[in-house]
Image (tube, rainbow, N blue to C red):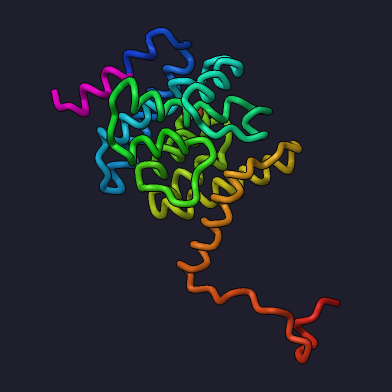
Amino acid sequence: MTPIRRQVESVRAAYGSLPRGLRQHVARVAREARDLAARWDADPDRAELAAWGHDLFRAHPPAEQLRLATEAGLPITEADRREPVLLHGPIAAVVLRERFLLTDDEVLAAVRDHTLGAPAMPLLAKIILLADKFEPRKRRRDPVLREIRRLARRDLDTALLCWADWKWVQERTFGWASHPAHWEARQRWVAEHHLDRAMPPILPLDSSDPDSLPE
Ligand SMILES: [Fe+2]
Ligand SMILES: [Fe+2]
C-alpha cells in the first residue's frame, strides 16, 4: 500500500465513531472528488484523502467546535461564534496535520476552505469544495447543482463562481447572512473572471455622453 493510501485508510477509520449519514456523504464526496480530479489531471488519491478529511468534525456539537478551534489557536470571528459549524474545516485541517501527520499543504487547504472558499485556492481545494456541493444526493435535491457539476468539467473557476452566485441568491432569499470570508473570496473570483475575459474596468460616468448618464 502506498503511503497516501495508508493515510486515506487511517482517516477513513476515524469515521467509525461518527454518524452513518455523515460517513455516507463523505464517501459520495470522495467518489465525486476522484472523478473530478482525474478529469483535471490531479491525483485522485490526494483528492480522496482531502475528501475523507473534510468533514471529520462536521458532526461535533457547536460548543465542542468552538472549544476545539480555541484550543487549536484558530482565529474565531463573530460569524463563527454565531455559527460554530463553520469552523469544522479549519479544525479538521489542524487535526490532520498534527494528529494524522499530513504534510500535503494543498490537501490541508482543501479541507480548511471547503465550506467558504478562499481568494486563492489550489486545484485540489476547488475540486473538494465543488465535489462536496454537488455529490449525488445534493444534486438530486437541487437541479442547479447538476448544472454546476456539468460546468465544473469544462471550467472549474467558472463553476466555483456560479456556485458562489447560487449561494448568494440562497442567502438573500432566505435572509441568511453572507460570511465575510466567503464574500472576500467571491470578490476575488469575480475580479479574476473579468480579467480572464479581458473585460475593461468599469469606467466613471462620462458627462459628455448623455447615453452613459442615469435617467
Ligand atoms: Fe463540511
Ligand atoms: Fe461535506
Dominant SS of magenta comes to helix
Seen at 42% across and 44% down, the residue is: 126
- Determine whether, in the image, residue 105 is placed left or right of residue 198: left
- Determine whether, in the image, residue 178 is placed left or right of residue 200: right
In the image, is residue 97 part of the stretch drawn in magenta?
no
Q: Residue furthest left?
A: 1
In this rendered view, identify the residue nearer to me: 176 or 184.
Answer: 184
Seen at 35% across and 25% down, the residue is: 96
Q: Residue furthest bottom?
A: 208
How many marks are shown on the rendered structure?
Answer: 0
Q: Residue 21 in the image: x percent, y percent?
A: 48, 15
- Quadrant including the N terminus: top left
In this rendered view, identify the residue nearer to me: 176 or 75.
Answer: 75
Q: Residue 185 in the image: x percent, y percent?
A: 54, 50
In the image, is residue 4 part of the stretch drawn in magenta?
yes
Residue 71 vertical placement versus 34 (above, below): above
Q: Residue 110 in the image: x percent, y percent?
A: 40, 38
Residue 198 vertical placement versus 170 (above, below): below
Seen at 38% across and 26% down, the residue is: 53
Quadrant of residue 131 in the image? top left
The magenta stretch spans which residues? 1-11
Quadrant of residue 29 in the image? top left
In this rendered view, identify the residue nearer to me: 69 or 113.
Answer: 69
